[in-house]
Amino acid sequence: MQTSAKVIAMDLGASGGKCFAGVFDEKGFALSEIHRFSHEPAALYIADRTGRVEERSYWDDLLIYRNIVEGLHAYRREIGANADSIGIDTWGADGVFVTEDGVLLGPMYCYRDHRLDGMIELVKSKMDPARLYEITGIHFQPFNVSNQLLWFMKNRGDLVRRGVRFLPAPTLFGYYLGGVTAVDSSWASITQLMDARRKKWSREVLRALSIPSRIMPSIVAPGTVVGELRAGLAGSIGINPARIIAVGSHDTASAFAAAPVSRTASALIISSGTWSLIGKLLPRPLTSPEAMAANMSNEGGIGNVRFLKNCMGTWLVQELRRAWRARDGREMDWEELNRLTGQGKPFAATIDPDDGGFYNPQNMESAIMDFCRRTGQEPPADRGTMLRTIYESLALKYRLVSEQIAQVSGSPSSVIHIVGGGSRNVFLNQLTANACGVKVVAGPEEATAVGNAMVQAMGLGVFKRLPEAKAMIRAAFPIKEFVPMERATWDKAYAHYRTVVK
């Protein structure tokens, strides 16, 4: 068994990417950030064949790739010329079609693109929703890859000729680095196309949606070696042709894997960032009618199932910041935003962060004000109060989802683990403890990269099973705890919240 390793973890989120070097040796585990960058989708206004102009939202995949390469250069400069492996995780949607000659059939659409606005109903018209949920365990979201591939076959199906295949987002970047064409089961599971129990593409679902099985990538288990860095690329950077390992390539799978949970049955996990993924680890999928009615998903984990709900996270704050940048001509830093939040009026209003009006509005500030007026509330009077309204509403939504998960799974939670970038938001962490009435354990902040590196180490044989790494994670990263306060005030706020959010 290999006892030491050096790995490169590429963590690509929906608003930025980071590159980390992970070192496993006799001292334990150390993770260091060596490169980071920001990115966002570009909006284009393009006329279709009828002359109708439509907004299209695309990712700049070549910008992301260039930054991955820059991360490899940074690794060579700061760590050395040899790495045992590379792992890539990404946001949980999107992909491209590529020909057998390596030519992409167009850019990579962003999951918020409006072409998907009516696709859920079309999917449901093709296959009984209850049967679809029974097979895949995935609830209905506009960004599901099932919607995306059905749209493509309906509108661009003439392009899907012999040899064309679909590459999910993490596979695309592995393809650029080393010709990778496989995807791991954690990412495949969220497509609404994989059989949740067999961990294979469901031929029944593919047939119902007219998606040819030949275009789908092979599914492998997390920890599988799927390729190696192209020799020419490695030579140009000055590093060895390191193995490419399929990690938990859905970033939430990697983040959940890094949560230092001691008792899974009583622990709720929130992967907090642009999205809030709120869930519990289960040994097997739960696809009961009650689970479907609660809109719960069964996403593939690392030796388990992530039974969760995908909720809006700090996207609302990010979009407010963007709207204010356009208005002010400057971008407010996070310290200024936090200061304004602290000055905001408590419980001035409450919103449902998952209301459809917040999914991709032209102006988030206007969308929040419209929601308040629509629900008979006075809109927040200033920026600080608007920010505080978002954070309070997120915490209250966490309580609602926690109660739903406990009811459906039969297992209430006595502790909440918050991992990911949102774990450093001390204000939101305390609000979450207050709203839910249980202790909150926050960290590690870079949970996705930690989980990514841990699965690589598992694939390299540093350890056999992920639970062996939990003590290593606790030792390597600071963990903060928050205890609930102001229970009566928050119980009252929750009662009001339930009148607004049905």
Image (spheres, rainbow, N blue to C red):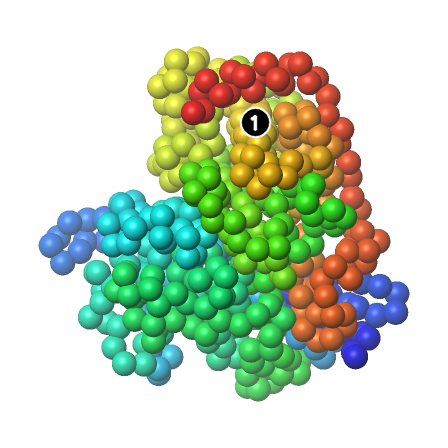
**Mark 1: few/some/many CA within 10 Å (<14, 14-19, 20+):** many
Residue 232's place in the image compared with 311, above or below, is below
Considering the image in quadrants, where does the C terminus appear?
top left
Left or right of 250 on screen, residue 119: left
Image vertical order of residue 232 relative to residue 116, above or below? below
Q: Nearer the viewer, residue 420 or 256?
A: 256
Q: Position of residue 107 (x, y in %)?
A: 35, 63
Q: Position of residue 312 (x, y in %)?
A: 49, 38
Where does residue 131 sit, x and y in percent of width and height? 35, 53
Q: Residue at x 44, y 13 (%)?
A: 378
Decide if residue 99 is in sight here: yes
Quadrant holding the N terminus: bottom right
* Quadrant of the image occupied by residue 102: bottom left
SS for dot 1: helix
**Does residue 419 appear left or right of residue 497 in this picture?**
right
Q: Is residue 212 above or below residue 351?
A: below
Read off the residue under disc 1. Answer: 396
Figure check: 245 above or below 142:
below
The residue furthest right is: 27
The x and y percentages for residue 370 are 36, 23
Q: List the single residue furthest toward the left.
A: 50
| Residue drawn at (54%, 17%) of the image | 495
